[in-house]
Image (spheres, rainbow, N blue to C red):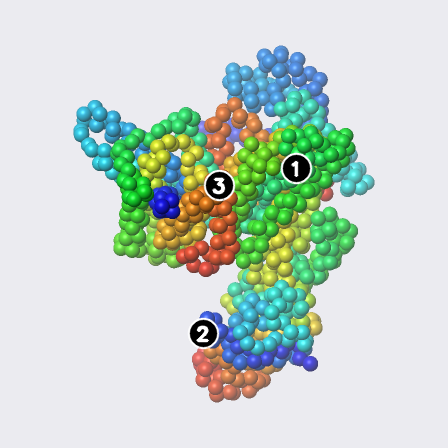
Amino acid sequence: MVLLQNLINALQWGSFYALIALGYSMVYSILMLFNFAHGDIFMVGAYIGFGVASALIALTAMGAFALPGWLILVLTILFSMFLTSFVGMIVERIGYRPLRAAPRASAAITGLMIGIILETGNLALLGAQRVSFPSMIDTVTYDMGGVFVTNKKIMIVVVSLLLAGALHQFIRRTRYGMAMRAMAFDYVVVPLMGVPLNTMAAMTFALGSALAAAAGILFGVAYPVLDPYMGILIGWKAFVAAILGGRGSVMGATLAGFLLGFIEIFVAMIFPSTLRDLIAYSIVLLILVFRPHGFFGEAYSARLRL
Amino acid sequence: MESTSEKLSSPSMLSRINIRAWVSKVPLLGWLIGALIAVGLEMAIGTPLARALGLSKAPTLFGFLIMLKKPLLIPGAALYLLLIYLLPIGLIARFAAAALNRLAAILADFSTVFSILIHLALLYLALHLWSGLSDYRVLVVKLTLIAVIVTLSLNVINGYMGEFSCSHPGFMALGAYAASVFTVSLFVNDKLFGVAVLPAAIGPFFFPIALFLGGVAAAIGAMVVAIPSFRTRGDYLAIISLAFMFIVKSLIENLEVVGGPRGLGSQPDWANLPTVFVTTVICIWVINNFVRSTLGKALNAVRDNEMAADAMTVNTRRTKFLAFLFAAFWAGVAGGLFAHVLRYVNPSTFGIQKLAEVLAMVYFGGLNSVYGAIVGATSISLLGEALRPLEIFKWIIIPLLLILVMIFRPTGLIAFKEFDARQLIQPKK
Amino acid sequence: MSMLRVENMTHFFGGLRAVHNYDLKIEPGEVHGLIGPNGAGKTTIFNLITGIYNPTEGEVFLEDNKLNGLAPHEIAAMGIGRTFQNMLLWRHMTVLEHVKMARYSKIGYGLIGAFFGTPRRNREEAESEEKALKLLKMFGVAQFADQWVPNLPYGAQRRVEMARALAMEPKVLFLDEPTAGMNPEELVQMMEIIRQIKEKFDLAIFLIEHRMKVVMELCERIQTLVFGEVIAEGTPDEIQNNPKVIDAYLGKEIVE
């Protein structure tokens, strides 16, 4: 019973990790770089979601239009994904495009720094107090033979699976997706064939950021307290998931996101919760030592382009 | 129009060239003596001068704090900076350059080692007197020196060997806790470890041992990262090192023996300025010796092409192992100093924040360069202090600065430059 | 006693047989050539002998010391120096540092010397520098000593790589297509260099080459490799007139 309950919690956590890990992974497949500001884009996405949702709720309250809660939520997710994708494109423009020829580590540093700027900028704009995410749908708890499932949890898992699936289809079927896959195969030669590297990079950042925004809102629905530093820990963990999945693999990133969720929840179930990080990271370390290229990544060792 | 503007600009161009020309003629000795005289001047007339200029007291950090806090006082603080620091140093550099060049030549001819020691003594004296004027300055100097050690040691891995290691805060934590446990349990009456075993009076002599133990603890921990590095490179190793950092942090959080998340305090006050200074100098000396030897250059060979390094008889495993343990050792020593300067540590100090800070210092200053590490650590620490009045906006300005550096000089300000103390102390022609 | 001996070496990459029953004997002072079409497995043989891959079967001896199972750097230190087809140089190291680095295994000062700059370290480093500069002079690249290698012209880079391999004081020097990408003028110079190496250094040379002219003029014995198997072995004349070789390989070249 406890096991099943935790399974559901793990699925929920895994959804956040998976959605964020997808962003890391996609950027990696195109540019061979990790976007270290991604965790903070998740945070920005959550705040944008907060703004959009508050505005929609206020408009409804003023009687501009009458929308049911679930529709507000859907609109919030879509709107915020759209808006946050621009944040991603700006990050790419400032922090990554000028560094195409630079060592990979330098781009990692600019990413980290943009992350700090996003955190601090948010702090400067909105102040230090946490904001609480508006509740758009009422929580309904279903008792399934002693296992309690809320409608929110189901919604979170379903929405993230839908988004991951949509991304998968996008990459399989569209022209952009095909170009992305080609770029992942060889990002030096493919641009010479007429695929515009800059557009593709911007697109990828936009897509990844949109997914991160969705993750941010879903996170806000589950844990309705936002603060400017919320992206750090969850972002780094999702990054670890992206690596575990194998760099540049969409399937791998999704699965590894869920896997990390499971590891964390089950470690916390068996051991005291203070040991969660210790054991979870030890497992990650062991996995990487014995399977140094993740689960789905190709087996070659990338070197720092220095 | 054009000709007038040319005429206007040419004298200033000329004078700029002149300034550069005479600056290049001033030996290091000249700058040090200039600094010493400036500090002496500040001790003698700093406070009255500051009062006369409308400042409440002598500015602690070259007037930057005052300027940012109270913009109205900018002229006063700038004038203070000019009169106390820039003018004396400039005058010495301008008019005593010839004499000091002769002196530097005599010293260098007599004995290089002796001359280097004289230069170091002058530098220490200047730092000592300058920081003697306020406790805040002492703290800033100590923390800056520690930052130099950390940055330099991280540069060994990230710059010289070209791996992106994220484990440095973890190494520092191991060093800080190992050294603290040693000193606190042996020499201090403390809640966690009970009464002191040895009299505190002989303690300072054991402090080097404590630091050494801290370094050794960090080096042992570094094996966790070093051994996977035989098979793995690049991103995966970066994650392994990141995971290591998280593991160390949460391990300490779970160790109630050393205070858990509440931290460990009441370290004895032994990390005084001379100790920190001497440790930093030794660190720079040893690391610079190492990276200039063939064994150290092997790190570059492994970075630039491992297969070629192997084919040229370089033992790549030994090289990687050595680099990680050596760098971790110094990070551990720095951690030990850090704990004894603040006289309190807790595990949350050694997290992502610290990592971002250290990485910023390494990449700002420049990869593969001892100069770069010194410049990066000093400028980021001092900038961090000087911008303190801006509060959180400091964390927008510093990252922006770093992004600009990365865009225009992707390997940092002074990358790939050899540090040669012998050359540094030479008289200038 | 031969300098380098390979017996019955076979290697598989997964299910693919890259090298089959390869035998080799190189005598001291000999220049031995290995020719064959692209993909015949020539560089694989180099990599097998130098320890980058472990042969699935077969044994390798250097003056009766068995090399199988040793790490690449150990094999190199025992006396096999090499250059690479695509020149593996170190981007951020100077020419002088390249050549000094190849003396890594000769360093005796250890960590104490490296950390504290002992007199012994200074002596050894100075000695190594002197030898390196001598080599650079011999190869006509001494004027580049303090430059990073990517700044050098192509031919000079090739020479630096050779000087580096010789700084190891090898007993056998492996040259993997030393004239690749060279114009006729550079080609003649490179052949002259190889001849000089043979005269001035006490070593054997194992040469992979694509250009017939080079192999025929320099080598004393030649093996022809096709699909991982030696189809002919002998003196340049024998090889030139061997119908199998002409069929498999030379046919095209002679027309040219």
Q: Position of residue C52 (x, y in %)?
A: 56, 67
Work out whether B415 lies above or below C210: above
In the drawing, what numbered circle is on residue B181? 1
- Rounded to the nearest angstrom, the CA distance separating label 3 from label 2 is 52 Å
| Residue topped by disc 3 | A272
Residue C154 visible in the displayed image: yes
The number of discs equals 3
Query: Dot 3 lies on which element?
Result: loop
- Rounded to the nearest angstrom, the CA distance separating label 3 from label 1 is 25 Å
Specify whether disc 3 shares its chain with disc 2: no
Label 2 is found on which chain of the structure?
A: C
Are discs 3 and 1 less than 8 Å apart at CB? no
Residue A95 figure quarter: top left
Label 1 is found on which chain of the structure?
A: B
- Quarter of the image with the C terminus of chain C in it: bottom left
| Residue topped by disc 2 | C16
Of B272 and C39, nearer the camera is B272
- Quarter of the image with the N terminus of chain C in it: bottom right
Relative side of B366 to A26, left or right: right
Relative side of A246 to C212, left or right: left
Are discs 3 and 2 less than 8 Å apart at CB? no
Of B224 and C79, nearer the camera is B224
Instruction: Give me the residue at 61% from left, 58% from top.
Output: B316
Residue C32 visible in the displayed image: no
Are discs 1 and 2 less than 8 Å apart at CB? no
Q: Residue furthest right?
A: B110
Residue C251 figure quarter: bottom left
In the drawing, what numbered circle is on residue C153? none
Q: Nearer the viewer, mark 3 or mark 2?
A: 3
Task: Indicate the amino acid at tag 3.
Answer: Pro
Task: Indicate the amino acid at tag 1.
Answer: Val
